[in-house]
Image (cartoon, coloured by chain):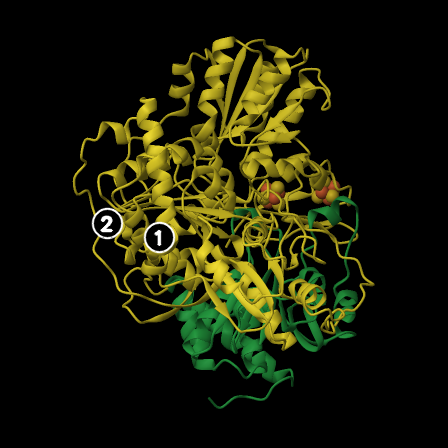
Chain colours: A green, B yellow
């Protein structure tokens, strides 16, 4: 399973990739993730690559090789869409943060138009991640909301391992809100009709 | 997170390459670890700090890479195990003592981590430090995964002690920053100073006869490295698969080769090198024996290709060797499995281009704007640049008349629109010396050098001595945010307490500058914009060496420590969408929605700079909840 995570630096894309890696190891899978780190990425485009299962070696993959695209911001999700394979699934937060380069040129971006662009090309689940994160009591946990929805739409990782991975990776201070956000994401996914409730 | 330094042997964890190296250092019983922050190497020391290694071993950032190396070398000649970490340009900074250390050799194991950055993702050049082996005459090891990074870290100490030479662990971003599953090894107590035996011919480089003798010794030691490495290392040079078509590779590139070969389902022998210098001649001549075509897959320079070609020609074996001439094997940038698959198919198997995966977006029909990393919201450097540019205007100069020499750090992001405030960013400390160069060559308007606090400590002090001594007209701006921000908020020599908990004597930049003999020194807080503009205007009009310290803590660090007491928001019906706020600040918390500007509330850090430049008073302060 290949997962691409597209985000704006600082939104928690790297944390998300780490939670997936830890969960994969807990479930006994082989794992690789690839990204670049450092403050220099803050507020810039960030793509993380996560690969789980089989004999994975390369920490990155190419166009058309992701089974899932997790987008924490719409413009970044569109930028990374080429990584998604035909028939792949995109799970995207409805957050829209146009970069300075666009505002300087008076360009603006329409949420509905960008989402339609994606849904014309891939199966798309749009998640009100910011609202649900705020509702969970941790506005910075939009990444966990997206993870919650993703958890219901894949079959490789167990929910128990993902939860345990969240507890290992997230600082105790933010843990409760993060787990709640994860739950709200999962519930939203089920309500949206994209996935059935899981029993495990 | 699990404490990766304490977790028991046999446990399997998801670790980043640099975390695995940190674990490897503890498994090897290191007692001194030092370095200078630089992406992608920084997380080794950060991991040791985070999990409390500083308690019983010495783990501290040093002022620069050469000092770091010398500290580690001093420890190792006394028998202690020591390590030092740096990014590629840092290896150049440490080169002088590094090369000399090959002549003196070590007693305790010494590992030098040099993290290269093909891509490049975060480095000014794509310097290929595998050549350091030939230049410095030191063994070079290369891991392909986090697991190998840990295991070769441990092996490098065994090798180092056996051949009495420092060992270079050369990595790339795709190893340092890759996360993989790693099985932990046993822990060992730190190996501290045993005894420093006085041995003048060995450790004093002032005697030329001694140096000649030590050079002979060094070459003898190198001749044993391959054999010793095979004995002490869990990670070997390996050959897998069989066939007459062979691929030789190393490091991150191995992963792409192994995946490509299995996808192609072809009969190919994969030769992976873990020892890059001295060239593993015996191993290579054996495994290449029955190869009829050889493809070398490596990132950046044709390093392994050069080794393989010269070895095969020495052996009189006229088999075709493909390397950088094969399709897609560029001298620049990174490889990936797809590129390698195509190269193997065309160069080795003579088959047509291999399959590509069908993407959800076969051709792009909608454009999305680029998002290069900007300065953060509330960044004090933004205020410094705005004040500098307005100060220039006030002093009667155009923006194109006063060259601004930048330096290495977050403040180099000021090169981007809309500020476009700096003209150069070259190497650590170069802002001051390059500004001096332009001036002494006859430039008749003011020149400005902008350098950060940690960069000043790292390599800015000597250039300042140079301009102060020669009395050159340069305005040096030291932007002091009291942290090494760009690489993840490490300590600087101005900190009173370090990551390890060690109490330190904080260095004062003012005192250093004054002690150098600069008489004209001012300090401003760039958040006090009026005063900062006036200071720039005043100092730009003056001759001589002037230093302006523009001091305000990194906004991100402030927000983490103190929270964000208030933020700003746009009053919708007052904003006319003139974009003045965006054009002055370029703050990433501001965006244009088609009609007016909005502030992403969760991103605003409340500096107020945008509000100040709104001609319609449309931006107001709010208390944040
Ligand atoms: S006050 Fe304005 S310039 Fe400052 S951080 Fe907030 S939005 Fe950016
Ligand atoms: S400067 Fe003021 S009026 Fe102009 S776009 Fe910004 S907030 Fe709106």
Q: Nearer the viewer, residue B516 or B243?
A: B243
Which chain does the numbered disc 1 sit on?
B
Q: Which of B184 and B546 is in front in this view?
A: B184
Q: In which quarter of the image is residue B353?
A: bottom right
Counting residues from the N terminus, which is met first, the one under dot 1 or under dot 2? 2
Can you say whether B437 is above or below B196 in the image? above
Q: Which of B38 and B250 is in front in this view?
A: B250
Residue B142 visible in this rendered orientation of the protein: no
- Distance from Cα at disc 1 to Cα at disc 2: 24 Å
Q: Tell me the residue at 51%/43% (across/down).
A: B131
Q: Mark 1 points at which residue?
A: B156
Can you say whether B614 is above or below B19 in the image? above
The answer as to whether the residues below labels 1 and 2 share one chain is yes
Residue B219 visible in this rendered orientation of the protein: yes
Where disc 2 sits, the SS reads: helix
Q: Mark 2 points at which residue?
A: B55
Q: Tell me the residue at 66%/59% (across/down).
A: B320
Q: Relative to B276, is B215 on the left or the right? A: left
Q: Dot 1, how many residues are within 10 Å of its Cα: few (below 14), some (14-19), or many (20+)?
A: many
Q: Relative to B29, is A30 on the left or the right? A: right
Residue B89 is situated, as x and y percent measured from the top left of the image, at 51, 38
Residue B188 is situated, as x and y percent measured from the top left of the image, at 23, 58
Q: Quadrant of residue B443?
A: top right
- Ligand 1 quadrant? top right
Residue A187 is situated, as x and y percent measured from the top left of the image, at 55, 81
Depth check, mark 1 against mark 2: the one in front is: 1
Q: Dot 2, how many residues are within 10 Å of its Cα: few (below 14), some (14-19), or many (20+)?
A: few
Can you say whether B266 is above or below A38 in the image? below
Which chain does the numbered disc 2 sit on?
B
Q: In which quarter of the image is residue B387?
A: top right
Q: Relative to B155, is B446 on the left or the right? A: right
Residue A136 is situated, as x and y percent measured from the top left of the image, at 50, 70
């Amino acid at each position: 399973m290949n997962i691409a995570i597209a985000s704006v630096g600082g939104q928690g894309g790297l944390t998300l990739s780490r939670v997936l890696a830890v969960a994969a190891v807990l479930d006994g899978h082989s794992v690789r993730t690839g990204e670049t780190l450092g403050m220099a990425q803050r507020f810039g485009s960030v793509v993380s690559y996560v690969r789980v299962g089989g004999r994975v070696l390369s920490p990155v993959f190419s166009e058309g090789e992701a089974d899932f695209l997790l987008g924490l911001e719409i413009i970044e999700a569109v930028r990374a869409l080429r990584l998604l394979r035909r028939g792949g699934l995109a799970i995207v937060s409805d957050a829209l943060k146009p970069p300075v380069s666009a505002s300087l040129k008076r360009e603006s971006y329409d949420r509905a138009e960008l989402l339609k662009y994606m849904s014309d090309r891939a199966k798309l689940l749009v998640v009100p991640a910011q609202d649900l994160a705020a509702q969970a009591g941790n506005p910075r946990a939009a990444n966990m909301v997206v993870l919650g929805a993703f958890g219901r739409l894949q079959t490789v990782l167990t929910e128990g391992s993902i939860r345990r991975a969240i507890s290992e990776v997230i600082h105790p201070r933010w843990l409760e809100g993060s787990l709640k956000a994860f739950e709200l994401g999962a519930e939203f996914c089920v309500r949206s009709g994209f996935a059935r409730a899981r029993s495990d | 997170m699990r404490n990766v330094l304490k977790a028991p042997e046999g446990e399997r964890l998801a670790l980043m390459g640099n975390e695995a190296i940190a674990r490897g250092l503890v498994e090897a019983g290191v007692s001194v670890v030092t370095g200078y922050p630089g992406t992608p190497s920084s997380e080794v020391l950060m991991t040791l700090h985070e999990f409390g290694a500083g308690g019983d071993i010495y783990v501290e950032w040093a002022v620069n890479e050469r000092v770091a190396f010398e500290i580690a070398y001093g420890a190792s000649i006394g028998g202690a195990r020591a390590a030092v970490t740096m990014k590629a340009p840092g290896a150049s900074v440490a080169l002088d003592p590094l090369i000399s250390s090959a002549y003196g050799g070590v007693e305790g194991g010494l590992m030098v981590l040099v993290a290269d950055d093909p891509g490049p993702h975060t480095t000014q050049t794509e310097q290929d430090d595998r050549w350091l082996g030939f230049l410095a005459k030191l063994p070079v090891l290369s891991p392909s995964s986090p697991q190998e990074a840990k295991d070769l870290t441990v092996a490098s100490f065994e090798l180092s002690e056996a051949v009495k030479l420092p060992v270079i662990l050369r990595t790339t971003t795709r190893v340092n920053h890759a996360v993989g599953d790693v099985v932990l090894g046993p822990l060992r107590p730190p190996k501290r100073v045993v005894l420093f035996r006085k041995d003048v011919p060995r450790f004093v480089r002032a005697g030329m006869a001694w140096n000649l003798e030590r050079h002979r010794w060094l070459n003898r030691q190198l001749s044993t490295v391959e054999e010793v490495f095979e004995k002490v290392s869990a990670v070997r040079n390996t050959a897998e698969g069989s066939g007459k078509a062979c691929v030789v590779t190393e490091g991150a590139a191995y992963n792409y080769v192994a995946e490509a070969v299995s996808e192609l389902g072809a009969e190919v022998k994969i030769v992976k090198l873990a020892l890059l210098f001295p060239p593993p001649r015996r191993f290579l001549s054996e495994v290449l024996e029955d190869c009829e075509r050889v493809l070398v897959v490596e990132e950046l320079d044709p390093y392994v290709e050069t080794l393989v070609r010269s070895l095969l020609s020495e052996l009189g074996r006229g088999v075709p060797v493909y390397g950088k001439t094969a399709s897609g094997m560029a001298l620049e940038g990174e490889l990936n499995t797809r590129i390698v698959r195509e190269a193997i198919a065309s160069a080795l198997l003579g088959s047509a281009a291999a399959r590509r995966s069908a993407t959800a977006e076969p051709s792009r029909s909608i454009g999305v704007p680029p998002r290069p990393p900007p300065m953060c919201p509330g960044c004090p450097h933004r205020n410094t640049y705005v004040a500098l540019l307005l100060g220039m205007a006030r002093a009667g100069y155009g923006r194109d008349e006063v060259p601004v020499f930048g330096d290495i750090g977050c403040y180099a992001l000021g090169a981007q629109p809309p500020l476009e405030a700096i003209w150069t960013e070259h190497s650590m400390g170069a802002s001051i010396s390059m500004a001096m160069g332009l001036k002494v060559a006859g430039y008749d308007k003011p020149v400005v050098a902008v350098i950060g606090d940690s960069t000043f400590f790292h390599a800015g002090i000597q250039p300042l001595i140079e301009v102060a001594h020669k009395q050159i007209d340069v305005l040096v701006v030291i932007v002091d945010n009291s942290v090494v921000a760009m690489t993840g908020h490490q300590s600087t020599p101005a900190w009173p307490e370090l990551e390890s908990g060690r109490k330190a004597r904080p260095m004062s930049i003012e005192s250093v500058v004054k002690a150098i003999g600069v008489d004209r020194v001012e300090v401003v807080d760039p958040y006090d914009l009026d005063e900062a503009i006036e200071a720039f205007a005043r100092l730009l009009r003056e001759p001589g060496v002037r230093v302006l310290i523009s001091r305000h803590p990194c906004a991100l660090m402030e927000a983490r420590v103190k929270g964000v007491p208030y933020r700003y928001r746009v009053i919708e019906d007052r904003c006319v969408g003139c974009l003045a706020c965006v054009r002055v600040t370029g703050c990433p918390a501001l965006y244009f929605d088609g009609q007016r500007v909005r502030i992403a509330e969760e991103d605003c850090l409340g500096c107020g700079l945008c509000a100040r430049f709104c001609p319609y008073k449309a931006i107001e302060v709010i208390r944040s909840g």
